Image (cartoon, grey):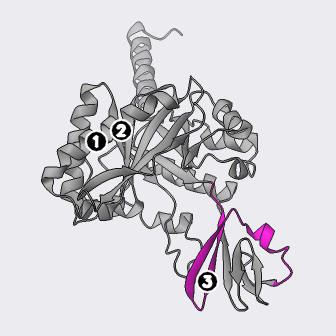
Amino acid sequence: MRKPKAAIGWAVLCCIAAWGSWSCRRPVPRHITPAYYYWKARLELDSATRAALGAQPGTRLYLRFFDVAWDAAAARPAPVAPLVVAGTLPADIDYVPVVFLANRMLTRCSPAAVAPLASHILSKIRAMAPSVGGSYRAVQLDCDWTAATRALYFRLLDTLCSRLHAEGRSLSVTIRLHQVKYAATTGVPPADRGMLMMYNMGNWKSPATRNSLYDPDVAARYLSRLAGYPLPLDVALPILRWSIVYRGGNFLTFLNLVTSDTLQKVSFLKRLEDPNRFVVEADSFAFGCGLRRGDLIRSETCSFRELMKGRKMLLEKLRNHNLTLALFHLDGPLLKHFTHAQMQEIFSSVQ
């Protein structure tokens, strides 16, 4: 028996409505732009770093151009430690000049210094850009501002935003975990985007800290308000690895690129129950450092598994569907700890 035309039409309309409702609920694909930070004093890419930049289409590079510190002689802020450019970037690389502002410097500035400081920052970037090669469409400021410097820093950001927008460029800023959790106190910086720095999340001065470099469980305590943060956020995750030496319960020094795998091969070191902790059993000299009996060494790193755990946690909370995922930082000895397949997975876009 044939159904009446009206019934058929009603059924079709119901199917269309149901499909439309389902399609609205489907998650929008998350597009991830791969990126690296380059935080060395000298720009000189080797074969490993060039290969990493070319492995993912559209890779972005956040390139530290210079710092801004207080010039006591001139009684004003001034650029210091500019990047030494020993080689140009590949022509197709989209790079972002990054300027680090010491919060201590901001405490010395007056509101009248903001406009000249903005001019000096932009003119210094323009002067350096031709030697780097390529072109840039955005600038990033890196500053761990405080309640005491918030007003002046935000005023600087407002000024920079206006001038960069007039040039057709944008401004991003780094955001720490505590600045997300306590946004009502720290404020939300007036910028186009923020880069959430998902590392250096523990007290590295304390020998009791489990992993000051990266601990997803610690990070989770700060992310309850991430979804409601009003600034579009990108993410930076660490591929750093180092060890920290403590003497008498106090911080002594960092041993860069020294891992637990290296430490466990040293005869005068005893591995503790925590496989990332070692105690010095005899006075010795190693890794460019004089070590004494009883010194504690804690190795810190971020494994691929932990990176993916943090990545998953962040993608579940972030609102924006287009974001940059940056690794800190681009360096051959760090890159060798990850396979090409692992890098592909870290940077992969998700549904």
For residue 248, which quarter of the picture? Answer: bottom right
For disc 1, the neighbor class at 10 Å (few under 14, some 14 to 19, many from 20) is: some
Q: Secondary structure at mark 1?
A: helix
Residue shown at 43% from the left, 27% from the top: 18
Q: What stretch of residues is rendered in magenta?
A: 239-268
Mark 1 and mark 2 residues within 8 Å of each other at the beta carbon:
yes
Residue shown at 21% from the left, 58% from the top: 109
Residue projecting furthest to the left:
112
Q: Quadrant of the C terminus?
A: top right
Nearer the observer, disc 2 or disc 3? Answer: 2
Pick the front one: 316 or 138: 138
For disc 2, the neighbor class at 10 Å (few under 14, some 14 to 19, many from 20) is: some
User: Label 3, on which residue?
Assistant: 246
Q: Position of residue 299 (x, y in %)?
A: 68, 72
Q: Is residue 57 left or right of residue 181?
A: right
Q: CA distance from mark 1 to mark 3?
A: 41 Å
Q: Is residue 322 left or right of residue 57?
A: left
User: Label 1, on which residue?
Assistant: 120
- Point out the tag, 1 or 3, that comes first from the N-terminus: 1
User: Within the magenta stretch, is there residue 6?
Assistant: no
Nearer the observer, disc 1 or disc 3? Answer: 1
Say if residue 33 shows up in the picture.
Answer: no
Q: Is 284 above or below relative to 50? A: below
Disc 1 marks which amino acid? His
Residue shown at 54% from the left, 44% from the top: 326
Q: Which mark is residue 124?
A: 2
